Amino acid sequence: MGHFCVRCGTELVTKVIEGREYEACPRDDFVLWRDPKVASAVVVEADGGVVLGRRAIEPGYGLWCLPGGFVNDDEHPADAALRECREEIGAGVEAISLIDVYHVPKRDASSMIGIAYRARLAEGAVMKPGAEMLEVRVFSLESLPELAFPSHRYVLDEFVRSRERAEAAEPRRAGAKARRAGPPSRAQARSRPERRR
């Protein structure tokens, strides 16, 4: 399918710009840049597992996915993540942390930049499927169903790794806090070298 210049309507041709091929107008300087779309994905923790929705739309009809979707041009990615949760799982969530920023390559469309967040259900929130979901359910990480998108498997793997890193760092943090809590002993104070300028 051909593309046309948004300025003059001329059909675009292939041009090499900075060593890469792009569609560009032969009459003016318009270039059809293949900028990536920005999307969010949210790992919502609930009842010892994670929330997934079974898709009511293509692509991936009937398969399971994380809540998430495209970021609108006028919203912050974290706000888009919260909005997508309200739309898809029918519940408010509280963002906890950023999991990762990742690239989703595409061959027949613009690639995507994914921004994955960790969240938990807001207090008193009750999940219900939105218009794009057939159902929503909590799954343990050990019994996940087939997922609609490989990028969501990546996000879940990163989520597990981030929890493992946080748990491994927790004893060190607790120890560091304990060591910082009190003043140095007299022996420690005497063993410190004098400061000289």
Image (cartoon, helix red, strand yellow):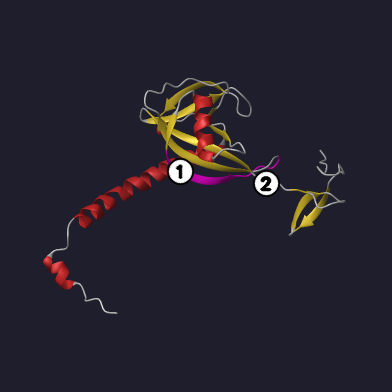
**Residue at x 62%, y 24% (from the top left corner):** 57
Question: Identity of the amino acid at label 2?
Answer: Asp
Q: Mark 1 points at which residue?
A: 98
Compared with 23, 89 (above or below) is above
Alpha carbons under labels 1 and 2: distance apart: 23 Å
Question: Identity of the amino acid at label 1?
Answer: Leu
Rendering coords of residue 77 (x, y %): 54, 40
Range covered by the magenta-colored residues: 96-108
Rendering coords of residue 169 (x, y %): 32, 50
Examine the rendering and report whether any part of residue 146 can be seen. no
Left or right: 181 as drawn, with respect to 114? left
Q: Which circle's residue, 1 or 2, is located before the other in the chain?
A: 2
Q: Name the residue under label 2.
A: 35
**Residue at x 67%, y 46% (from the top left corner):** 35
Front one among 67 and 107: 67
Left or right: 104 as drawn, with respect to 179? right
**In this view, which residue lies farthest toward the left?**
186
Q: Is mark 1 on a helix, strand or loop?
A: strand
**Residue at x 40%, y 32% (from the top left corner):** 120
